[in-house]
Amino acid sequence: MTANVLFDIPGPRARRRHRIGTFVGGLVVLALIGLGLWRLGSNGQLEAERWAVLFDSSSGVPQAFGRALVDTLQVAAVGMVAATVLGALLAVGRLSDHAWVRVPVTTVIEFFRAVPLLILILFCLLYLPTVGLDIGPFGALALGLTLYNMAVLAEIFRAGILSVDRGQREAAFAIGMRKYQVMTLVLLPQAVRRMLPVLIAQLVVLLKDSSLGFIVGYFELLRQARSLVEFFNFRFGDRYTFQIYVAAAVIYIVVNVLLSLLARYVERRTRTNRKTAATEELELPADVQMGGGGGTV
Amino acid sequence: MSFLADNFTLLRDAFLTTLSLAVVSGICALVIGTLLTAMRVSPVAPLRGAAGFYVEVFRNTPLTVVFFFLAFGIVQIDLQFPSRFITAVAALSLYTAAFVSEALRSGINSVPPGQAEAARALGLDFRQTLTSIVLPQAFRTVVPPLGNVWIALAKNTSIAAGFAVTDLTAALQRLTNQNADQLLVVFLAIVCGYLVITLPSAWLIGVIERRTAVLR
């Protein structure tokens, strides 16, 4: 439903009221932004020289951020690939006809979805070394992200497979295909195409969650920013703190917005695709749409 | 097992901290999120723009970064939260509000346009259409997504541990230092603490969802 059903096409008086509302609303928004900028300015945070350090390669800041971005993307990429593969396997397992496969797989999925991601990462970091599996902060972060997201992705895949029109499955069985053929040749190819936008949305969440590395001591963007700040504080005092934090946040937001745009683009393409658009609108479990909201999201 | 008894007060306080973090930020997020949604469907363009911008920014920022800014960044504009707990509540509610707003807006979008058109045809104005026709239906379809936002929020409170709030995760870190030989029990105890919050919530959401479902 679009917003314009909710109110009439405005007449002259309503238009005047809206103009006043627009003016006042705009003023409030501008005032808030202005207040923030003014406070920053009066603390000298907006001096060009303070921001210049972010682009000055002799200070080492751009290189450090570049390395941190690569490290962040690395851990996220490992998590994405592993979680997607394991998630697909778990989804098929959960849809299995055999209870001895379905029940344990369902338990695994439900367990990993119910536990906070940070706890999983800490478990990998603190417990696994005591049983002889020392995987370091990178491994712990990647494994934690994988375990959590494979459970979420399994639900996404399952929803996708279930959303394929029932007739497809029945027709495939009717022409004599085996179960695995139905799954691999008929259901999965259709499901994956329709799942793509949600899949990418979940990968954005995964990338966001890699910032938890800050807490477990992996040098991703945020921790790199913190150590840069400590380094600069030591040499120049509390001079570049704000600028470096802002830069880290902006890098995160830009990367995530780019991925979200990709998701939207893929979604538009799948919607206009004749092959996938024939079946009805996809209904996903709501928690999958929400994407955990971080470690959840 | 004796350590569970030894550290009972620590675990209990940590559990209560986690629970109150989740509840307080949940309520704040609901209020902010509802306001944001009202702004996003309003006829006033700057409000629509501002709310849309807010949601887009917060959805694409890691919660850790939000925490980080509220803990270390805002001193630069001469603001300071009175305590760590309130910093955590502010971060969690600002972040979750964006998702609440998304859930509510998708709920409003799920009400068939015919409902609003019929309301408009009967001569109800914007406020009446929204409060007596659209929102009551939207709130029902919104129960499951909002419930999941709540569960995600309960799990997200664990990040507060990284910013000096003694919640369950912080208790975990403290206990693992003291009880290196009983790590598995420590982890189990902490995980149970979270499950005590999330599993009954999931069950309750299921019940409410069945009770309020709208047949379409």
Image (cartoon, coloured by chain):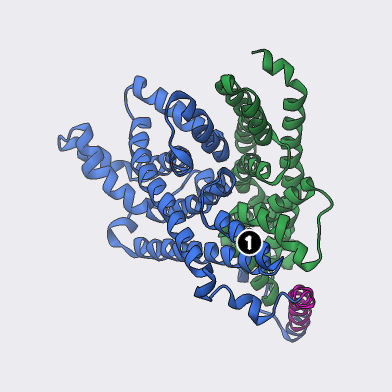
Q: Which percent across, then down, holds residue B163? A: 69, 46
Report which colour depicts chain B: green
Q: Give the residue displayed 67% in from the left and 36% down from the top.
A: B170
Give the residue at the far top of this rendering. B2
Left/right of residue A188 with respect to residue B173 in the rendered view? left
Please say if B170 is above or below A70.
above
Front residue of A289/A280: it is A289
Q: Which chain is blue?
A: A
Amino acid type indicated by mark 1:
Val
Left/right of residue B94 with respect to residue A295 in the rendered view? right
Give the residue at the far right of this rendering. B82
Q: Which percent across, then down, holds residue A87? A: 38, 39
Report helix, strand or loop for mark 1: helix
Q: Main secondary structure of the magenta part?
A: helix
Locate the N terminus of chain A and report the quarter of the image it occupies. Answer: bottom right
Which residue is tagged 1?
A229
Q: Which percent across, then down, holds residue B47? A: 70, 72
Tell me where the magenta segment starts and ends, as one range. Answer: A18-43
Task: Please check the rendered image and state whether residue A5 is part of the magenta-colored stretch, yes or no.
Answer: no
Q: Quadrant of residue B179?
A: top right
Q: Quadrant of residue B188?
A: top right
Q: Give the residue displayed 74% in from the left and 68% down from the top.
A: B125
Asked whether residue A6 is in view, the answer is no
Please say if A59 is above or below B189.
below
Q: How many marks?
A: 1
